Amino acid sequence: MRDLHTRFARTFAAWPDKVFIEDGARHWTYGEIEEQSARLATRLAELGVAPGERVLVQTGKSVETLLLYFAVVRLGAVYLPLNVDYTEAELAYFVSDATPVLAVCRPESLDLFARIGGEGVAIRTLDQLFADLPEAAAAPVPREPDDIAAILYTSGTTGKPKGAMLTNANLVSNGESLVDLWRFTEDDRLIHALPIFHVHGLFVAMHCVLFSGASLVFLPRFDAETVLAHMPEATVLMGVPTFYIRLLGEPGLTREAASNMRLFVSGSAPLSADIHRAFEQRTGHRVLERYGMTETGMITSNPYEGERRAGFVGPPLPGVEVRIAESGTGKVLPQGEVGIVEVRGPNVFAGYWRMPEKTASEFRSDGYFITGDMGFIDVDGSIQLVGREKDLIISGGLNVYPAEVEALLDDRADVAEAAVIGVPHPDFGEAVVAVVQPAGAFDAEAVRADLRRDLAAFKVPKTILTLDELPRNTMGKIQKKLLRERFAGLFSEG
Ligand code: MCA
Ligand code: AMP
């Protein structure tokens, strides 16, 4: 097994003059990317970045951010990307938990990082890092398969966010599987409109391109019209279901517009069978749906050749084992029965950063990771996800754990108790909604504004509803299922 840098270097060496990335105004060849990232690595090493040390990154989507990723990997250090939307309260936790040697932020966040940085953390903007780059290229540091290459934080149903430690072997094996499975070659051109602080945009999309010598059109964010405009000279799009929903809203999305494209991939949230069919009708393309998690990278994928079944996420990737088990007992269930999806393989992460007990509780003794997703395996080996055991809302492909929002609401004097639920939404798939039993006077908009100070915007409830009494079972527990049923039409009616 090669380490991640060695895998990148193979492509750099094979196609030095080929364009890797273009962002509309500029383009960079693989050779330029290698040279710049190697010189940036020299700068990082001067700042104390060394094998195993964490580099925390909260910068926008730019080629410079990508160069930073490659430079960190080159030094055998640990890349830790964060959503640019996170607030001070959220960031303070990540910094204290990850104890990075370097934090890279946007200029407007320098003061904030100085407040939360703590001792021993160098704080720099990208401009500062790139100013007068040293001429010398840092020597790559070889890594073992089990060495950690990245930490990505994921929240949980209870407690603090957990840093999922992804190894060199996890990232290389998953990337190579996907290149094979999805038939990536150096002739491909991918439209990249995802954020680069999650597995989907950073590893799945980027590694498919990098491992195969393909190229990418690098867009700052998803905009349906812009994506459509790039289709005639592109071959692949990867996105969350909201991308496909919004593309369908574009009259220009036609067979002709999509005729140069060979592959549309969807994941991170369920793609409804209706959207799958509507997209096929308009473009002649069957979206290829796959399923993954931060902790595991990609787990299953519909086939490239063969039937891409609407509503199914396909069979496991080669080398990945999936089984369905009974919740709680862990008893393995026969084919066709619904239970919790468990997964084992070279893609499965090394554990949560500095949380050995939490790690142990999410694995079975024989090494299977418990995903918290519910599904069954069909006769053809394809998996259908039918729901989630974990109390999680996925809005536009972003995860929101109700417990985090509820804790902030429950702490307020004007709230007796709150329940946060996911409600079907035509654009985001699910939208975050809070149902509150007020304690006295209650101003929903003022409460939303308060929440916005502590929470990234995508986690803030789109609506806060009030009820005199929240429905409870005989044990006094709030019955979220009843609330979900009652408000299911909130965003679809009139
Ligand atoms: C932005 N907002 C959102 C979301 N995104 N609210 C709920 N859900 C969201 N996903 C907020 C904005 O801050 C803004 O708030 C308001 O909603 C309207 O934003 P809008 O302009 O519509 O948003 P946008 O900028 O167009 O973004 C929507 C998006 C984006 C394109 C769907 O969220 C996106 O790119 N999502 C992809 C996320 C992703 O990469 N997930 C992969 C995770 P305000 O009005 O208050 O300012 S990795 C993963 O899940 C696993 C491994 C896997 O299987 O892939
Ligand atoms: P994250 O923690 O951000 O990596 O999100 C992982 C979760 O996204 C999984 O546990 C699933 O619940 C969900 N997910 C990813 N891909 C799909 C998909 N194709 N269909 C349904 N849910 C998905």
Image (cartoon, helix red, strand yellow):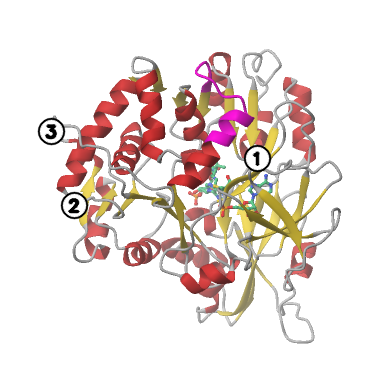
The residue shown at (63%, 64%) is: 366
Kind of residue at badge 2: Gly
Query: Quarter-wise, where is residue 128 in the image?
Result: top left
Mark 3, residue position? 132
Residue placed most toward the observer, 455 or 334: 334
Identify the residue shown where x is 57% and y is 55%: 399
Q: Is residue 127 visible?
A: no
* Amino acid type for the residue under numbered disc 1: Pro
Mark 1 within 8 Å of ligand 1, using the beta carbon:
no
Which of pointers 2 and 3 indicates the residue nearer the eye?
2
Q: Nearer the viewer, mark 2 or mark 1?
A: 1
Q: Is residue 11 above or below residue 376?
A: above
Residue 42, image x, y percentages: 18, 39
Label number found at residue 222: none
Tag nearer the camera, 3 or 1: 1
Q: Closer to the camera, 442 or 238?
A: 238
**Depth check: 191 or 328 in front?**
328
Does residue 271 sit above or below 55 in this rendering?
above
Q: Is residue 177 magenta?
A: yes
On residue 318, the disc is: 1
